[in-house]
Image: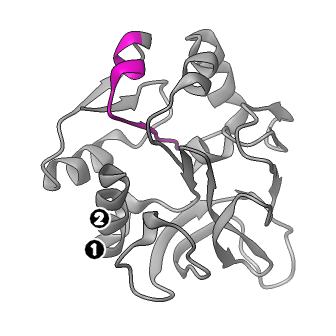
Amino acid sequence: MVAVIDYNMGNICSLGNALGRLGAEWVLTSDHTQISRANHVILPGVGNASEAMVNLKRLGLPEVIWKIRRPVLGICVGMQVMCRHSEEGNAECMGIFDAKVKRFSEMQGIKVPHMGWSRISNLESNLFKGVEKNPYVYFVHSYYAPLCPDTIATSHHPEMFSAALKYENFYGVQFHPEKSGEVGERIIANFLSL
C-alpha cells in the first residue's frame, strides 16, 4: 500500500492517475498509523513551503515522517519541506535533506517561475534505473535546492540546482514525475520497487 500524505498541498488527481496506471494500491491519508505502516509514502506538493509546514505541523506529521524507515518520496514542495529551511515564507522545514531552499534570481531573460520541460542530468540513484540519459521532465517552481551532498540529479535555470535529493530512505524530486510522461512514470515505478 502507498500512503499519499494529505496535508492540503498536493496535486492528488495527477498523482493518483499515475499510481493507478502502475497498478499501485494507494490511499490519501493524514492518519499516523496508516502512514507508518505503508510500504511506500509520497509527500506531494503544490504551493507555498511555509503554508505546507504549518499544515504538516498542525497534523503532527513531521515527527511521523522522520521515523519512517520505508521509502519516502517528496515531490516539488514536498521535497522542499524535507530540506532544512526555505526562503519561501522564511520556513523552518523538516531537515531531512542538508539543503536550504532559495528563490531563483530574477535576471534579464530568465522567467520565474521555472515552468515547463527541462532536462535532468547526473542521475545517481536507483530512482533513475532504466531512464534515458538527460531526459526531459516537467517543472513548475520558483524556489530550488542548491547542489549539496544529498543531490542525486541536477538541472539548471540558469544556475545548476538539485533536481532530486536522497538521504537514507528519503527521496525528493523538484520536478513532477506524475506530469512527466513515460520518464516520470518510470521514476514512480522505480520508487515503488525500492
On screen, residue 39 versus residue 64, left or right, reads left
Q: Residue at x 60, y 46 (%)?
A: 168
Residue 96 against residue 110 in the figure, above or below = above
- Magenta span: 33-46
Residue identifier under label 1: 182
- In the rendered image, which quarter contains the N terminus? top left
Mark 1 burial class by Cα count in 10 Å: few <14, some 14-19, many 20+? few
- Give 53 or 165, whichever is nearer the viewer: 165
Q: Is residue 85 magenta?
A: no
CB atoms of marks 2 and 1 within 8 Å = yes
On screen, residue 10 versus residue 54, left or right, reads left
Please provide percent x and percent y for residue 190.
34, 61
- Amino acid under disc 2: Glu
Q: Residue at x 38, y 11 (%)?
A: 33
- Amino acid under disc 1: Glu
The quadrant in which residue 71 appears is top left
Q: Residue at x 76, y 79 (%)?
A: 110
Colour scheme in the image?
one colour
Please provide percent x and percent y for residue 177.
40, 61
Residue identifier under label 2: 185
On screen, residue 182 versus residue 103, left or right, reads left
Mark 2 burial class by Cα count in 10 Å: few <14, some 14-19, many 20+? some
Residue 143 against residue 117 in the figure, above or below = above
- Judged from the image, the secondary structure of the residue bearing numbered disc 1 is helix
